Amino acid sequence: RLLGSGEPAAEEAAATLAAKSPTALKVTLAALRRARRLGPLERVLEQEYRVSCAALGSPDLVEGIRAQVIDKDRSPRWSPGTLAEVAEEDVARYFAPLGADRELRLATTDSLQEVPW
């Protein structure tokens, strides 16, 4: 949609996005869509933590650091290399439970008692 809008700023944004990890782009979109349904901010932050933990183990994080910081060639080789190659299962892994001992559990503001000052 950005490319077809005819707006220079939109086309520039599309070019910027096209240079990013296809997996990260799909995970980000899924996270935004899921966040809409999660309710309170605490649930959204828990999801963000889960996605961030999964990203730490992704090959694209290492590749992005290599391309930007180590070799400075600014030519990352993403895996997979295109949006079409990113399977739904790949995206779903970022949202998988981390296990009881690693999950972040935040109390909602509704569940907190008023603190007397």
Image (cartoon, rainbow, N blue to C red):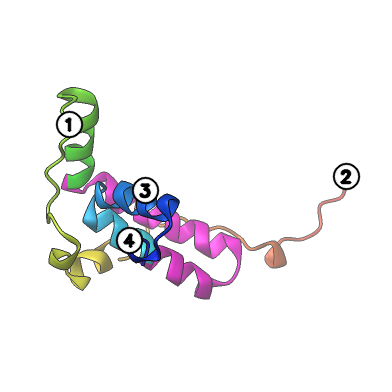
Which numbered mark, 3 or 2, is in the foreground of this view?
Answer: 3
76 on left or right of 14: left
Residue assigned mark 4: 3
First-in-chain label (3 vs 1): 3
- Number of residues whose C-alpha sits closer than 10 Å to that of mark 2, classed few (under 14), some (14–19) or many (20 or more): few
Distance of mark 2 from mark 4, alpha carbons?
Answer: 54 Å
Q: Position of residue 81 (x, y in %)?
A: 12, 54
**Relative image position of residue 112 (x, y in whole percent):** 71, 61
Q: In this view, which residue lies farthest toward the front?
A: 6
**Residue extent of the magenta highlight:** 30-59
Query: Is residue 108 a member of the stretch shown in magenta?
Result: no
Q: Position of residue 82 (x, y in %)?
A: 15, 59
- Marks 3/4: CA–CA distance: 8 Å
Question: What percent of the width, then of the height, locates residue 74?
Answer: 19, 32
* Disc 1 versus disc 4: nearer the observer: 4
Residue that badge 3 annotates: 12
Question: SS class of the residue under badge 2?
Answer: loop
